[in-house]
Image (tube, grey):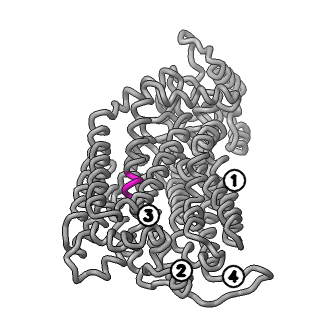
Amino acid sequence: MSKNEENDLTQDSDKIPNDTSGNRNLEEQDNVNNEHTASDNKESPYTHSAAETDGPSLPQRSPSMTYEDMFDLTGHGRFNFWALIATSLFLWYSAIETLSMAYVLTPIECDLALSVAEKGLISSGCYIGLLFTGLCWGGITDKYGRKKVIVPTVISCLFFSFLSSMSTNFWAMFFFRVIVGTMLSASFSTVLVYLGEVNTRAYRDKAVSWAITISVTLFIVIPALAWAIIPGRWTINIHTMIVRPWRVFMWMWSLIGGMAVLILIFLPESPRFLYAAKGIRAALPAVVQIFAWNKKKKKEEFPVITLASTSTTILDVKEKTLKETVNHMSLLLRKPMLMPMLITHFCMFIVHLTVFGLYMWLPDIFYATMQHLDLKISMCDIIVIKYGDKGLKNATRVSMFSGGGDTGETCAGLSSDMYPVSMLAEFVFMLPYFGLSLLIHRINKIHIYSVTLGVSQVLFVMSAFIRQPIVAMILIIFGTASAVPAILTAMADEVFPTTLRATAMCTMFMAGEIGTILGANLMPLCALSVQWCWGLFICVAIANLASCVWIEVGWPNVEQVRAIMEERGFPY
């Protein structure tokens, strides 16, 4: 090759390809695959080397290389670090928008003159949005791409969250919180899909686990931030609106989401999605960009590879009609996808019911526990004492910072004791995630799920019977501190194909949100009597243990499932 030809190729290193013969062959293959008319007897144009599609000619590395093999050449480095940071910030921001309203609802009760029912609606506004739009967003993400959905929806979420913080009445606040939940539904699960798809096989599970671990760890900052801001007594009048510390606290959330968006804007679309949706020609620029970032090399230095001929059909998801899209998603309810769908959705439902449903009550329960340290009582006794004689008035998550007083007492001030207690609970809550991040790639994920959840449920039930307040409080902390949602996410990422993964993830987290809402509403039943509390604790533990048995016995062989789906034209 002449020097002039090499210079021409180098100047055009961001594009694919310069060789017209290679272009024509790759275009023909994409067209054949999209029309589902590829013949098994014809030579696959994927056997052309990447030298025809990017950069100068180099010696061939492999006569038969799959997409996964090619992507492994990108390695692990700077790009993966920034993708991990962006994902962790997204998850942190999502958790803040849904859980941190617990810190806000008490002070806004006075400013917006809210009733107990209205406070409950505002606290569930995000969950309502998450529940009713998850399936829709999953289909859109699988059709148009990960990044194209995440960035605009998070920006919209930031905007509507700001509007909710400026609300001066119940209906405005409730409406904007529902919209916030709708936007979060698009990004919360999709960002985990994106992270899994931009990491190599060796780091995929670790990356997802570390992203969740980092976000859980960072959440300990929220009670500290609330402690620093919300107890303030200052006010600023802006026309008819009074700016109080709780509004500033809500504004701080947007900084986290904004940082995540800013990072993701500079990252490429998921190459695995591009490969599944449009073929190797569309995916190769993203692969080369990741290679250049990780290896600190020029794009034209990407090693020449040869993609092996495969029966996998590249799906043209962009041209599907609505009916075809629905049929496409219905594949999740057929074999071999049906069993993974049922198991992951049931497990996520029951785990969220226990972990996040009860989590909303923990600071309030801890506060009540510290007031009865001199008595020999169990956790169920504490729950009945705290809520049983007060009905539903104080049996809401918003009472966790009031110390159990009436509305007038709540408006008078917040109990500062609740903030350090919340920080302690968050610290314990993050410990299993650290352990998971170290073990997930070394031990079978199914066994980690079963052992972790099984032990936690034994401790959970013991807290209902042991009549030592301090011991009972420690047991219920560890009984609800479970990292199994992260395990389920990693398992789902592994078993669902690229063009169905976002849909499966979104519906799985929808099932989890239903469990969260149901779990949060079990507390009034627990408060009816100690016997009712015992029964509910035992039933919840049995359901969790049943999920352990089901996942051990019923989880299919992932390699076989992937082979079947790839034969049907669904790449991984």
Work out how far the residue at label 3 is from the one at label 2, CA to CA, in angstroms: 32 Å
Say if the magenta span includes residue 411: no
Work out how far the residue at label 3 is from the one at label 1, CA to CA, in angstroms: 24 Å
Is 20 displayed left or right of 331 in the figure?
A: right
The amino acid type, in three-letter code, at marker 4 is Val
Q: In this view, does 391 lie above or below 58?
A: below
Position of residue 211 measured from the top left corner of the image (x, y, whole percent): 46, 57
Say if the magenta span includes residue 352: yes
The amino acid type, in three-letter code, at marker 3 is Val
The mark nearer the N terminus, 3 or 1, is: 1
Work out how far the residue at label 1 is from the one at label 2, CA to CA, in angstroms: 40 Å
Q: Mark 3 points at which residue?
A: 216
Q: Name the residue under label 1.
A: 152
Can residue 442 be seen here? The reply is: no
Work out how far the residue at label 4 is from the one at label 1, CA to CA, in angstroms: 28 Å
Q: Name the residue under label 4.
A: 243
Is 149 displayed left or right of 291 in the figure?
A: right
